[in-house]
Amino acid sequence: MAEPRQDSHGCGNCSDLEEDKYSDDDFETSKLGTKEYWEEAYQKELETFKDIGDVGEIWFGEESMNRVLRWMQKAKIPEDAAILDIGTGNGAFLVELAKHGYRNLTGIDYSPASVELARNVLQAEGLTDVTVKETDFLNCGGELAGFDVCIDKGTFDAISLNPDDNKEGKKLYVHTLRDALKDSGIFAITSCNWTKEQLLERFCEGFEFVQELPTPSFQFGGRIGNSVAALIFKRVR
Ligand SMILES: C[S@@+](CC[C@H](N)C(=O)[O-])C[C@H]1O[C@@H](n2cnc3c(N)ncnc32)[C@H](O)[C@@H]1O
């Protein structure tokens, strides 16, 4: 399944995928990496949405969607671009994309409750032509292909936390992403677990780094850091 090894396309420090010598492999796992956790969380959010119309948690806040949307508009991503929201959760990003004119939208999530919630949220906004599917990104049987843009906000983070097999999960994620994107397709990732450098290392083969989007920084003990990394990559072969 692995593609032939390629040059690093400027993102540098490429590791061999098969050996998987990534600097992020000693990361601690957590229940946030399990399907059970997300299913329970979205079951509760679904009930709350049905009761009071609250869509629930917007991971990393509204600005995390706005900064990607601003980049997409500046980059003149056409409104008919095929866009995939990987691990859509409550579907809030799909709603914002639709409000910004994007009309070829697909959201996937492996949690059935998330899919039901996202469909409910979209329906409440009158957005009936957005596709939301129950799909495991790591086990989708080649079903995901032909996308111009793939967006991830917190899903690679969750996959990286899987207590069962996060190492294999991270590798599978990169393989599936490469298959899902068209040539020159765009990958926009927002992560709170990984630094820019770790993401550059992970999304190295088959991707070219395009830009880092500015995120709020903090200063602690004389050091400056960012709580969230938001990066744009381009699929290259
Ligand atoms: C931190 S939440 C982020 C949700 C959404 N992207 C947002 O920004 O609100 C992580 C999401 O990834 C989903 N997820 C985790 N692993 C997945 C997988 N293998 N396939 C599909 N979805 C997955 C979870 O169900 C959850 O909805």
Image (tube, grey):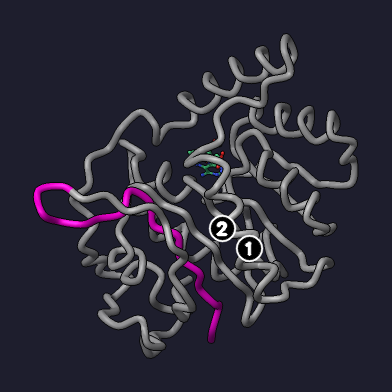
Quadrant in the rendering for residue 126: top right
Q: Residues within 10 Å of mark 1 (few under 14, many from 20)?
A: few
Give the image location of residue 159, x and y in percent. 42, 45
Q: Report if residue 222 lies within the magenta region.
A: yes
Residue range in magenta is 220-237
Compared across the picture, whether 186 is left or right of 96 comes to left
Please state which amino acid type lies under the numbered disc 2.
Arg
Give the image location of residue 218, x and y in percent. 27, 49
Q: Report if residue 218 lies within the magenta region.
A: no
Above or below for 70 versus 221:
below
The residue beneath circle 1 is 70
Which label was assigned to residue 208?
Answer: none
In space, the residues marked 2 and 1 are separated at their CA atoms by 5 Å
Quadrant in the rendering for residue 148: bottom right
Above or below for 3 versus 190:
below
Count the marks: 2
Please state which amino acid type lies under the numbered disc 1.
Arg
The residue beneath circle 2 is 67
Compared across the picture, whether 132 is left or right of 185 comes to right
Whether tag 2 and tag 1 are in contact, CB under 8 A, the answer is yes
Give the image location of residue 111, x and y in percent. 60, 32
Residue under the point 70% across and 27% down: 117
